[in-house]
Image: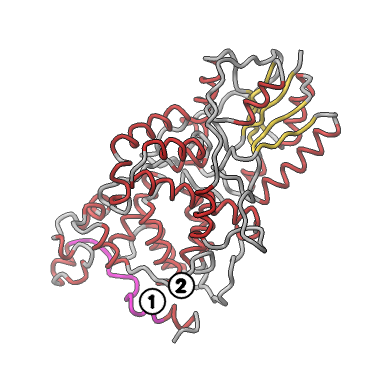
Amino acid sequence: MTRAVVLFTSDLRLHDHPPLRAALAAADEVVPLFVSDPGVRRAGFNAPNRRAFLAGCLADLDASLRRRGGRLVVRDGPVAREAAAVAAECGASEVHMAAPVSGYAHRREERLREALGAGGVALHVHDGTVTAVAPGRVTPAGSDHFAVFTPYFRRWSAERLRDPLPPPRSVRVPGGVRGEPLPSRDAVPGVSPDLPEGGETAGRERFLRWARSGMPAYEERHDDLGGDATSRLSPYLHFGALSAAELVVLARERGGPGAEAFVRQLCWRDFHHQVLAARPEASVRDYRSRGDRWRGEEDAAEDIAAWREGRTGYPVVDAAMRQLRHEGWMHNRARLLVASFLTKTLYVDWRIGARHFLDLLVDGDIVNNQLNWQWVAGTGTDTRPHRVLNPVVQGKRFDPRGVYVRRWVPELRDVEDARVHEPWRLPADRRARLDYPEPLIALSDGLARFKHARGRD
């Protein structure tokens, strides 16, 4: 009787899962294993919203395995130690897992390979499980990664993706392998009130509904703040409850401008993965240094607190920050706006904003979060690093009737459309009745400071 272990990490699903299918092909019995990594908890990436969503993903994965005769084994401890222990307990000759991307994940793989090797167990790492196109699969001449999105998108689009793998019909798990109880979402404190349900089942249902009703108009409506027309699939992609490769294939099958725009967004995700795989230090340091002299927690404490709490005096910024706290999620256009406001209008270090996002975002990961913040801050891959997004102009363009603002900033619910993005222009007596703050800083003053700091007077 041959046995193998499948180590689930950021791939909590049964559909289109190369490590699982490889293990099932190689062995008579397979142990599906998830290890709760204390290293992740110590690093601060185990925020309440993600812990709660993860609990839902694990519960759904276990239920799907049980319908196929299997179960999910959950262990708590260092990944290398626990995976090696499980392999020894069941007599497995090999372990399968998805290829890592971050520096931490690569170091974890090295420790795992060493621990397994000491027991004569082989480790098989599978590309294309977390992303549609594996990092490093397409590279420009003379470099190990693309630093500009458009040429990467052209090469990425020309790659032939593998056919999505169906879920297994049955999974035979050997008896006697010890596991911990599944974590409970209800036991996690501090969860955002409107956090979505986690798991592959919920993710696939959400995708199918949105593909019918939202994808056809996605190209025209993806920036519509009030319309909330995006897919909201990012949490499911972050935890691997959905396969990026399968979503690309399914979208291309549907076709049309909306599907093409959606695929482009999936490509952005792969783009950031290949950047960080090549430059793992970009998770904490500027990808491209501009000589910024950022303000930090000590010299910008009040401004940072106002930004975090959604009381900057700029309605679209405040709406977005309140949505983040309430849902553990934020509209993509809003993410750009609040990041630009913090880093370029308030001139605060991008790492402070990235850390706050990681504290709350259910889809917050070290790849997309850090590199998107760097893109906006002008230290990343943006070819126009000095661009500044004006929250008033952007609000009027992408929330012209103030639907998004009024949804999250009820203090402004009675302000007419013409002034909802500029309440400071209202008569003084009306402003006094709003219980809404004056702007933290004039946009012109923020722009002048940013230009001076960047040496662009």
Q: Residue at x 50, y 55 (%)?
A: 154
- Characterize the local packing of mark 2: few (<14), some (14-19) or many (20 or more) Cα atoms within 10 angstroms: many
Residue 237 place in picture, x, y as percent: 49, 40
Q: How is the image coloured?
A: secondary structure
Q: Which mark is residue 446?
A: 1
Distance between the alpha carbons at the discs numbered 2 and 1: 8 Å
* Residue located farthest toward the bottom when viewing the structure as drawn: 457
Taking depth in this image into account, of 117 and 16 the one nearest to the observer is: 16
x, y (%) of residue 47?
Answer: 52, 44
Q: Position of residue 119 (x, y in %)?
A: 85, 29
Whether residue 41 is situated above or below residue 353 in the rendered picture: above
Relative to 28, residue 364 above or below:
below
The answer to whether 389 appears left or right of 355 in the picture is: left
User: Which quadrant is the N terminus positioned in?
Assistant: top right
The residue identified by callout 2 is 347
Residue 100 occupies quadrant? top right
Who is closer to the viewer here, 7 or 85? 7
The residue closer to the viewer here, 402 or 223, is: 223
Under mark 2, the amino acid is Tyr
Q: Report the residue at 52% width, 63% height from top.
A: 374
Residue 447 place in picture, x, y as percent:
38, 77
Name the amino acid, label 1.
Answer: Gly
Residues under numbered marks 2 and 1 in contact, where contact means CB atoms less than 8 Å apart: yes
Residue stretch in magenta: 434-448
Examine the structure image and report whether residue 443 is included in the region drawn in magenta.
yes
At a point 73% along the width and 31% down the height, the residue shown is 82
Element type at mark 2: loop
